[in-house]
Image (cartoon, helix red, strand yellow):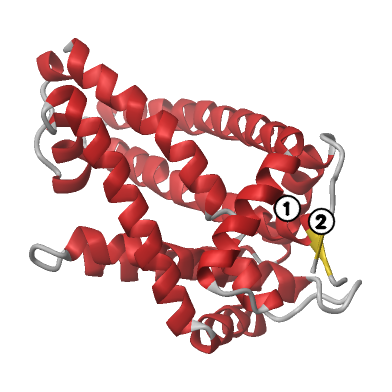
């Protein structure tokens, strides 16, 4: 395995390649994302350990969608059937389910540690809202200690996410053990930080632009529903907001494969 140092402009290229890949098989990617999100949501409902189990499953979802992206590139110029894209993701997860669960356990430990450190600033208020779903009042959100805990969590989560960015793919395609995959992922993200930064900025722009469009459409639907004297417009608008956010998330995950493919190659 060889680490490649890529120019910063590759970050925008990864976004474009991810969008192109998604639109080659949008139904397959959306179905896959909903499938994995449903599994995470069901796991989160388990008493006491639900939140932790959901965290453990997140690397599995990452690998599944990266494998789906890779399958669309298997034969250049040939569009892979939606069924084969879906099955490629399931096969990848099934093949490496044990190391994925180990990696997921390490991710859960890291995430809970981040929450524990943030709890030192506000006594666990932010962690309770994020992990346990406790209600958040406007007054609590405006408290200085709550906002400090939020910023601490964000600052600590960034290096955690980079450490696990390439880890599932390294385990699957290069047979790297879980702990080593975390180390190599962190090194790769540090060495290619410029490309990853541009990748994040471009995706932020895409999300903001899509959010504006969805908000405008939702506002029109709500206004039309109000003029008609019914709530159908509001209901459709809510569905558009939630559905649009999930589709955008599926697009984002479809682009992760390209950041891994360009960062590592066979030695």
Nearer to the camera, 248 or 262 = 262
| Quadrant of the frame with the N terminus | bottom right
Q: Is residue 96 left or right of residue 155?
A: right
Query: Which residue occupies 34% across, 49% down?
Result: 111
- Image coordinates of residue 84 in percent, x first then y, are 66, 85
Q: Is residue 263 left or right of residue 183?
A: right
Query: Which residue occupies 68% across, 41% down?
Result: 190
Nearer to the camera, 2 or 251 = 2
Q: Secondary structure at mark 2?
A: helix
Q: Secondary structure at mark 1?
A: helix
Nearer to the camera, 165 or 130 = 165
The answer to whether residue 199 shows anywhere in this view is yes
On screen, residue 206 above or below 146: below
Quarter holding residue 215: top left
- Image coordinates of residue 94 in percent, x first then y, are 49, 87
Quarter holding residue 98: bottom left
What is the spatial separation of the Cα atoms under label 1 and label 2, in whole angstroms?
6 Å
Residue farthest along the right direction in this orientation = 77
Q: Are marks 1 and 2 in contact (CB under 8 Å)?
A: yes
Disc number for residue 13: none
The answer to whether residue 31 shows anywhere in this view is no
* Residue tagged 1: 259
Quarter holding residue 53: bottom left
| Quadrant of the frame with the C terminus | bottom right
- Image coordinates of residue 206 in percent, x first then y, are 63, 34
On screen, residue 249 above or below 78: above
Query: Which residue occupies 73% across, 53% down?
Result: 259
* Residue tagged 2: 262
- Image coordinates of residue 222 in percent, x first then y, are 33, 29
Q: Dot 1: within a 10 Å radius of its alpha carbon, few (fewer than 14), some, or many (20 or more) residues?
A: many
Query: Which residue occupies 52% across, 83% down?
Result: 96
């Amino acid at each position: 395995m060889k680490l490649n140092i890529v120019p910063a402009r590759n970050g925008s290229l990864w976004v474009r390649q991810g969008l192109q890949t998604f639109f080659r098989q949008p139904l397959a990617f959306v179905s896959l994302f909903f499938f994995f999100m449903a599994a995470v949501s069901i796991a989160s409902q388990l008493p006491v350990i639900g939140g932790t189990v959901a965290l453990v499953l997140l690397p599995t979802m990452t690998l599944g969608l990266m494998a789906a992206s890779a399958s669309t590139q298997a034969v250049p110029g040939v569009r892979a059937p939606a069924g084969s894209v879906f099955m490629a993701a399931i096969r990848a997860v099934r093949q490496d389910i044990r190391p994925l669960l180990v990696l997921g356990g390490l991710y859960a430990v890291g995430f809970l540690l981040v929450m524990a450190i943030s709890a030192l600033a506000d006594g666990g208020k932010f962690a309770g809202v994020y992990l346990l779903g406790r209600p958040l009042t406007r007054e609590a959100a405006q408290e200085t200690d709550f906002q400090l805990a939020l910023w601490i969590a964000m600052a600590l989560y960034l290096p955690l996410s980079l450490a696990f960015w390439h880890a599932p793919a390294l385990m699957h395609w290069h047979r790297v053990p879980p702990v080593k995959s975390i180390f190599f992922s962190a090194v790769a993200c540090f060495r290619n930080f410029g490309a990853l930064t541009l990748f994040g900025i471009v995706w932020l722009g895409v999300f903001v632009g899509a959010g504006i469009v969805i908000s405008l459409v939702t506002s029109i639907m709500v206004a039309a529903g109000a003029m008609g004297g019914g709530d159908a417009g509001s209901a459709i608008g809510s569905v558009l907001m939630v559905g649009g956010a999930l589709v955008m998330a599926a697009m984002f995950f479809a682009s992760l494969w390209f950041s891994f493919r360009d960062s590592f190659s066979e030695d």
